[in-house]
Image (cartoon, rainbow, N blue to C red):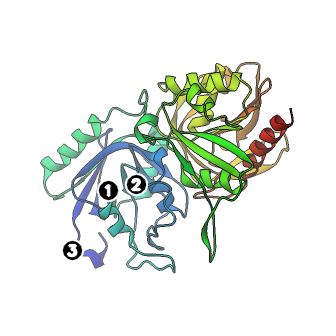
Amino acid sequence: MPPFFSGLAVPAILALADGTIFKGFSIGAAGHTTGEVVFNTAMTGYQEILTDPSYSRQIVTLTYPHIGNTGINPEDVEASKVHAAGLIIRDLPLMASNFRSTQSLSDYLKAENIVAIAGIDTRKLTRLLREKGAQSGAILVGNLGNEPLAAQALELARSFPGLSGMDLAKVVSTTAAYEFTETEWKLGQGYGKLGKPAFHVVAFDYGVKRNILRMLTERGCKVTVLPAQSSAADALALNPDGIFLANGPGDPAPCDYAIAATKELIERGIPTFGICLGHQIMALASGAQTLKMKFGHHGANHPVQDLDSKKVMITSQNHGFAVDAATLPANCRVTHVSLFDGSLQGFARTDKPAFCFQGHPEASPGPNDVAYLFDRFIALMQAAEKN
């Protein structure tokens, strides 16, 4: 425990389902939380990570040791609330300094009622997750000298069933349709507003991040966001020029409503673009299968190759499930692969104007190497308009 917290720190315990116990101190809300413990290798962007709906029911370990340096600001959130089930870090800095900061990380976590722990060996935890795979865990705030409390934390960890078979898209999705008109952030100006749109895109919200929608509006798209369980008929009634399948948490296989809607919309020949969970939904709608990864891809430094251009890009990733490339049907062409493990990162339909990408091309947080995929989507809609 850091000396500057002596006498002030509130003890906390992190327990993993395999029986491993870490002792640290609380930097968030009181109480306890459970979820799947994963690690993220990004050096920046903790605020975007916490508010990414794709982290629903997951406790995030950040491998970079100093988290909280730049505080929190209301402009960088990716959703209306924190979606991560909990946070694990090594060190919380004494001070936060940034001209946009309005709040400290610790105060933000408390305000959002998020349980979080600091002061543990995140290198050891990351090695454990890398070797054994992501596993169920729990953070419990309380007296570390209380052995029954440690046993309680372990019991909580083992009570979490894991994400396989868990449909979370409908849990984090909007409950009502809405229009999104905010464009990308610019220094000194903040966020802009969409002018006269060139296209109308209907986005299925499986856990969409705001900057994904901004990448569309910045390119002249009026965006109507629909709840995850909306049907193809709901989307068609809006007369869209294109369909966007958003990111999101959980296992894609149980999302039968999304798979059915996507299949019908693709078959109708409407230009369709999917990312993250949307990529997996498109694969299932095309006849492929998905699988649970050992520890997933979570970070902002993942190399991916575009097989068409042969270029290697550094990408932002956040997924625990993947499309099994061996199950792709003949009408699906692989376009991107991970250079970390060779896993599938993107494919395009050869018979319909539809394509998808596993990573997060909107760069929140992370690099913007893959932003050109949004331009590709625009080009598909332009081509459809001419026909």
**Residue 106 visible in this rendered orientation of the protein:** yes
Q: What is the x, y in percent for residue 383?
A: 84, 38
Q: What is the x, y in percent for residue 60?
A: 42, 51
Determine the residue positioned at 47% across, 62% down: 47
Quarter holding the C terminus is top right
CA gap between label 2 and label 1 equals: 8 Å
Identify residue for label 1: 114
Upstream in sequence: badge 2 or badge 1: 2
Identify residue for label 2: 82
**Residue 290 visible in this rendered orientation of the protein:** no
Residue type marked 3? Leu
Q: Is residue 266 above or below residue 191?
A: above
Foreground mark, 3 or 1? Answer: 1
- Crowdedness near tag 2: few (<14), some (14–19) or many (≥20) residues, C-alpha within 10 Å: many
Identify residue for label 3: 8
Q: Nearer the viewer, residue 184 or 358?
A: 184
| Residue 226: assigned label | none
Upstream in sequence: badge 2 or badge 3: 3
Residue type marked 2? Val
Foreground mark, 2 or 3? Answer: 2
Residue type marked 1? Ile
| Numbered disc 3: secondary structure | loop
Determine the residue positioned at 71% across, 52% down: 197
Quarter holding the N terminus is bottom left
CB under 8 Å between callouts 3 and 1? no
CB under 8 Å between callouts 2 and 3? no
Q: What is the x, y in percent for residue 67?
A: 45, 67
